[in-house]
Amino acid sequence: MNILLAKAKKEDLEEVHEIEIASFPDPWSVDSLWAFASDETVRTLVCAREEKTGELVGYYALQYVLDEAEIAIIAVKRKYRRQGLGRYLLDRIVEWAKEKEITKIHLEVRSENEAAAHLYRTYGFEEVGRRKNYYEAPRDDAILFRLSI
């Protein structure tokens, strides 16, 4: 599968939001997604589309300051999971970070999201802390990860 990455546009947000709702128990609103997509200074929202069909298969949102970045969201459409797309998106994020001279990437994940935590650990992220009962509905801890580049 060939993937095209592009900054999200306003017309992408409904599709992005559908994946957001299907992926997370506490999905971001369209307005919150647009805040990332429209901020050209320290935030970005990037869509991943299958080249032949144009189907949105995933996306990520990140923010950065100086030499550090935080992945706010990384999501893959359910039918495309477990095909290496999450790792592919992480590869693109790390490439981008190197170009921007980012030295550390941070993220947090629900402790119950074992698949995501496994992906981050095998990618080289290290667990650097936990926030007890950070998430609500359902209540869950946040695992804090960091990747040094």
Image (tube, rainbow, N blue to C red):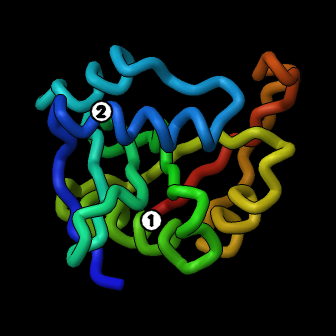
Residue position for label 1: 90
> How many numbered marks, from 0 up?
2
Which quadrant would the N terminus be assigned to in this image?
bottom left
Tell me the quarter of the picture where residue 97 sits: bottom left
Observer-side mark, 2 or 1, equals: 2
Tell me the quarter of the picture where residue 4 sits: bottom left
Residue 98 visible somewhere in the drawing: no
* Residue 116: percent from left, percent from top: 69, 57
Q: Amino acid at mark 1?
A: Leu
Q: Secondary structure at mark 2?
A: helix
116 relative to 42, above or below: below
Q: Earlier in the sequence, mark 2 or mark 1?
A: 2
* Residue 23: percent from left, percent from top: 62, 43
Q: Residue at x 31, y 37 (%)?
A: 64
Q: Secondary structure at mark 1?
A: helix
Q: Residue at x 12, y 31 (%)?
A: 40
Task: Answer left or right for 26 relative to 87.
Answer: right
- Taking the view exactly as shown, the residue that stands out farthest to the front is 53
Q: Marks 1 and 2: in contact by CB < 8 Å? A: no
- Taking the view exactly as shown, the residue that stands out farthest to the left is 40
* Residue 81: percent from left, percent from top: 60, 68
- In this rendered view, identify the residue nearer to me: 54 or 100: 54
Q: Disc 2 versus disc 1: distance between alpha carbons?
A: 21 Å
* Number of residues whose C-alpha sits closer than 10 Å to that of mark 2, classed few (under 14), some (14–19) or many (20 or more): many
Task: Answer left or right for 19 relative to 145.
Answer: left
Task: Answer left or right for 117 relative to 80.
Answer: right
- In this rendered view, identify the residue nearer to me: 126 or 79: 79
Numbered tag placed on residue 13 in the rendering: 2
144 relative to 147, above or below: above
Q: Amino acid at mark 2?
A: Leu
